[in-house]
Image: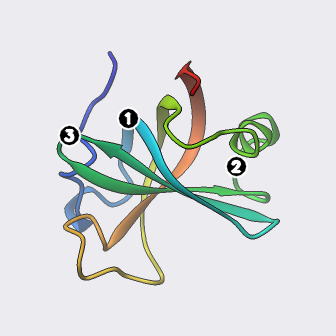
């Protein structure tokens, strides 16, 4: 299965659920110990989080080499965002990534 949900449909009703998403890497923010990625598909954006402490080491290392427009499939858990984005439908949640598969490099 390529995805269980689209990037534009997850909300707080999905908290603590395991999901699979696929899409394009839209934006990357790396703070050294945590990486946020906005994942995009035709339905919207979802924020992914790769945390040095909570993400498996191999998955965290893969997040450091991702580039814009890479196509990826991820599996992870829906968490409530500390810093909410009211301009996004998915702005209340983020996905803590547990697995990543690069489908196409850009």
Q: Is residue 106 above or below residue 78?
A: above
In the rendered image, residue 15, in percent from the top left (x then y), is placed at 33, 61
Tag 1 near tag 3, CB within 8 Å: no
Secondary structure found at label 1: strand
- Sequence-wise, which precedes: disc 1 or disc 3? 1
Residue lying at 63% horizontally and 41% vertically, measured from the top left: 67
Does 90 sit left or right of 32 as displayed?
Answer: left
- In the image: residue 7, left or right of residue 103: left
What distance separates the C-alpha of mark 2 from that of mark 3? Answer: 27 Å
**Residue linked to disc 2:** 55
Q: Is residue 19 above or below residue 4?
A: below
Q: Position of residue 41 (x, y in %)?
A: 28, 40
User: Picture coordinates of residue 35 (x, y %)?
Assistant: 67, 60
Measured Cα–Cα span from mark 1 to mark 2: 20 Å
Relative height, residue 71 to residue 25 (above, below)? above
Foreground: 88 or 2? 88
Residue position marked by numbered label 3 in the rendering: 42
Mark 1 vs 2: CB contact within 8 A: no
Query: Residue 28 occupies which quadrant of the picture?
Result: bottom right
Image point 74% across, 42% down: which residue? 56
Q: Which mark is residue 23?
A: 1
Dot 2 lies on which element? loop
């Amino acid at each position: 299965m390529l995805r269980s949900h689209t990037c534009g449909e997850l909300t707080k009703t999905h908290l603590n659920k395991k999901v699979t998403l696929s899409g394009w890497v839209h934006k990357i923010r790396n703070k050294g110990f945590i990486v946020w990625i906005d994942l995009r598909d035709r339905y919207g954006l979802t924020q992914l989080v790769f945390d040095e402490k909570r993400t498996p080491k191999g998955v965290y290392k893969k997040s450091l080499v991702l580039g814009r427009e890479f196509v990826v499939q991820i599996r992870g858990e829906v968490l409530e965002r500390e810093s909410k984005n009211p301009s996004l439908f998915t702005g209340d949640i983020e996905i803590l990534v547990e697995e990543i598969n690069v489908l196409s490099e850009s």
